[in-house]
Amino acid sequence: MKIKKILLFMITPLFFNHVYAADKMCDSTLLPQEFKVYYNEKVIVANQPFEGSTEKILPTRNEFQGTPGCYIACYSHEQNQSVYPIGDNIFVMGQIRVSGHYTNKICQPTGFEDKDISAEQEFKFKCEKVFPDKCTKSSCWAGGDTGGWFGS
C-alpha cells in the first residue's frame, strides 16, 4: 500500500505539469481568422476532417494578441448566419480571443475567473460589436468552452 501511495505522489505532479503545459500552449496560440472546423449531423464538431463531416469556416477574431489569451465563443438561438449547431436550439456564430487563460479547456477571461460569462453583459456586447451581422438585437451570449480546438 505504501508503494502505491509513493507512486501516486510521484506521478500526480507529472500529470498536473502536463495539464499546465497544455493550458500554457493554448494560452499563447493564435488561431487563423478563417478557422476551419468540421461538422456532421450528429452535432460533432472537430478541427480535423473526419468521415461524413462538412468543412465550415468559424469566424475568429484575434482582438487580443498577447499572452495569456483564450477564445470565447458567441452563441445564439438564431440559426440564420450561424456556423453550426451545438444542440437544443443553440448555434455558434464565431469566436473572439480575449485576455485570459484556459483551465480544463475552458476560457477564463481576465477578471472573470471561475465565473459564468454567459450572463455577463460585457461579453454579450463584445459579440455584438465583433459580429454585428450575426449577433443582432442582443441575440448572442458568450461561453468559454473552446479549449478543445487545441487537442488534449
Image: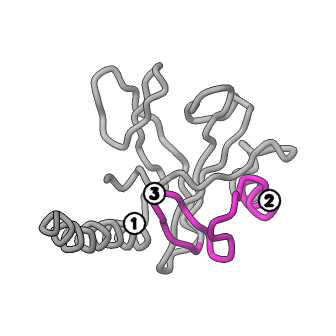
Separation of marks 3 and 1 at Cα, in angstroms: 9 Å
N-terminal-most mark, 2 or 3: 3
Location of the N terminus (image quadrant): bottom left
Separation of marks 2 and 1 at Cα, in angstroms: 25 Å
Q: Secondary structure at mark 2?
A: helix
Left or right, 58 with reference to 91: left
Disc 1 designates what residue?
A: 26
N-terminal-most mark, 2 or 1: 1
Disc 3 designates what residue?
A: 105
Q: Which residues are magenta?
A: 99-128
Residue type, label 2: Phe
Kindly report which numbered mark, 2 or 3, lies closer to the viewer in this rendering: 3
Q: Secondary structure at mark 3?
A: loop
**Number of numbered labels in the structure image:** 3
Disc 2 designates what residue?
A: 125
Residue that lies at the very extreme toward the front in this rendered image: 1
Q: Which mark is residue 88?
A: none
Residue at left offset 48%, top offset 77%: 68
Do the residues bearing badges 3 and 1 touch, measured as CB atoms within 8 Å?
yes
